[in-house]
Image (cartoon, grey):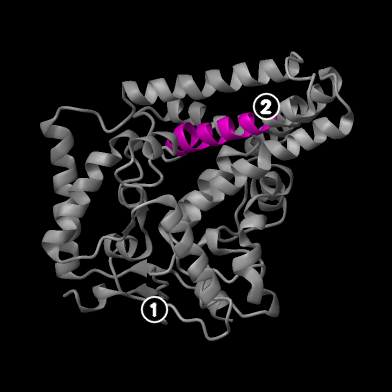
Amino acid sequence: MLQKTTSQLKVRYKSNKRKDEFAKDLIGRVNAYFKENNISKYANKEMIFKTVLGLLGFVVMYALIISNVFSGSVWSILLAFTALGFINIFIAMNIMHDACHNAYSAKKKVNKIMGYTMNLIGGNSYLFTRMHNAHHAFVNIAGIDVTLESHGMFRFTPHEPYAPIHRFQHIYVSFIYAIVSMHWVLVKDFKWFFIEDSIGNEKNIQHPKSELWTLLITKAMYYSYAIVIPLLVIKAPVWVILLGFVMMHLPSSLFFALVFQITHVYNGTHYPLPDDEGNIQNNYFMHVLETTADFSRKSKLWTFMMGGINLHVAHHLFPTICHVHYPQMTEIIRETAEEYGIQYYENPGFWNAYGKHLTLMHKLSKPDGAVPQYGSSAAFN
C-alpha cells in the first residue's frame, strides 16, 4: 500500500537555505575546477582510448570465438564466452553509461550513437536511459526507484511488504544477480516496452514507433551473432555453445549487478519517504549523499575498469560529466562536505562494500528489519 501511495504522488525535493548553500557552493567549485584547468567536462584522450579498447576487444574476442580457435576444448570455449561477457560489461560501464547520460560528448548525436553500444551487447539504449534516469531522480525512494523493484523476490527496503521467502534473501541474492543480464536481454526489455506503462514517476508512457523498430531489429541482430551464428559455425556440440551463451552472462552479470547495488543498498544507507504532499525532506544533493556510497576510491584500476561507477556520489550529483573526471571531482565533493559537516559515505574496497550489502539484506530478511529514512541531514539547518 505504501509503494502504491508513493507512486501516485508527485515527488519533489524540499529546499532549505543551509542545504542549498552547500549545493550551490559545490557546483561552483566543480565548475571552477574545469574552468581553471581549461578542460572539457566531456570525453578526453583517456575516454577515447577506453572506447577503442572496449570495441576492439569485443571484435577480436568474437572473431576468435567464431573462427574455431577455441573449439578444441570445451573449457576454452566456455572461458572465451565468459571473457566476451566481461568485455560487454566493460563497454556498458565505460561507454554506454556515459552516452546515455549525455556525458560522452557535447553533441547529442554522438551520445546517441555511442549509446547504441547497449543494443550491441543485447540491451536497449532507449529503455535503459528512461529507466536509469528514473533511478537517478528518485534513488532509494520505495515505489518509484525502479532499481528497487523485484516483484516480491527481494526486500531491498524496509518499506517493501515482508514475505516468507525474504528470510533467505541474503543467501540467494547473489545467485539471482548472476542471471540479471540474461533476463535483461531475453525478457526485461520486452516487458518494459509492451507490458509496463509506467517508469518511476512517469505514467501512461507511449513509446515512439521508431523505438519499437529499433528494439526488434537490434534484438534480432543480437540473437543472431550471440546464438545463431555460433551454432552454425563453431565446431562443438550444441549444448556447449548454448552453455557458452549462458557463461557469457552469469559471471559478468553478477559483477555488473553488484557494482551498482552496493553503492545504494548497503548497511548504513537511508530510505526516505515523501510526506503526504510528496515532499522529501532534503534537497537533491543531500538526498544523494545520504543514499549513496563510493568504494575503492583510491584504486585507479577499479576506477578505470568500472567507468567510475565506484565513485558513485560524483556520478549522481553530476551525471552529465564524463566519468574520467570523477577522481578529481570526488576530492572536491569530500572536501566540501567535510567543511559543511556533512557525512560522505564510502567503503575502502569492493569486498567491504559487498559485505555491507549482504548485511543489509540480512537485516531486511526479518519482518522488523529497520533502516532510518534520514541521517544527520535531519539536523542540518
- Is 110 drawn above or below residue 284 in the view shown? above
Mark found first going from the N terminus, 1 or 2:
2
The residue pinned by badge 2 equals: 80
Q: Which three-letter amino acid code belongs to the residue tagged 2?
A: Ala
Q: x%, y% of residue 10? A: 44, 69
Which residue is nearer to you in this view: 150 or 108?
150
215 vs 291: above or below: above
Q: Say above or below: 155 vs 228.
A: below
In screen coordinates, is 299 left or right of 276?
left
Task: Give the residue displayed 67% in from the left and 44% down from the top.
Answer: 250
Residue 222 showing in the rendered view: yes
Residue 11: percent from left, percent from top: 42, 69
Where's the N terminus, which quadrant? bottom right
User: Which residue does the image show at 79% across and 37% down from the upper left?
Assistant: 243
What residue sits 89% from the left and 28% below the top? 237
Residue 80 picture quarter: top right
Q: What amino acid is found at the position of numbered circle 1 in the picture?
A: Pro
- Quarter of the C terminus within the rendering: bottom left
**Label 1 belongs to which residue?**
372
Q: Judging from the image, what secondary structure is the residue with disc 1 in?
A: loop
SS for callout 2: helix
User: Pointer 2: residues within 10 angstroms few (<14), some, or many (20+)?
Assistant: many
User: Does the segment drawn in magenta span residue 93?
Assistant: yes
Mark 1 surroundings: few (<14), some (14-19) or many (≥20) residues within 10 A: few
C-alpha span from label 1 to label 2: 45 Å
Q: Residue drawn at (61%, 45%), measured in percent from left and top?
A: 253
Question: Whole-percent x and y of residue 314?
Answer: 31, 48
Q: How many numbered circles are shown?
A: 2
What is the span of residues highlighted in magenta in the rendered image?
A: 81-98
- Is most of the magenta stretch helix, strand or loop? helix
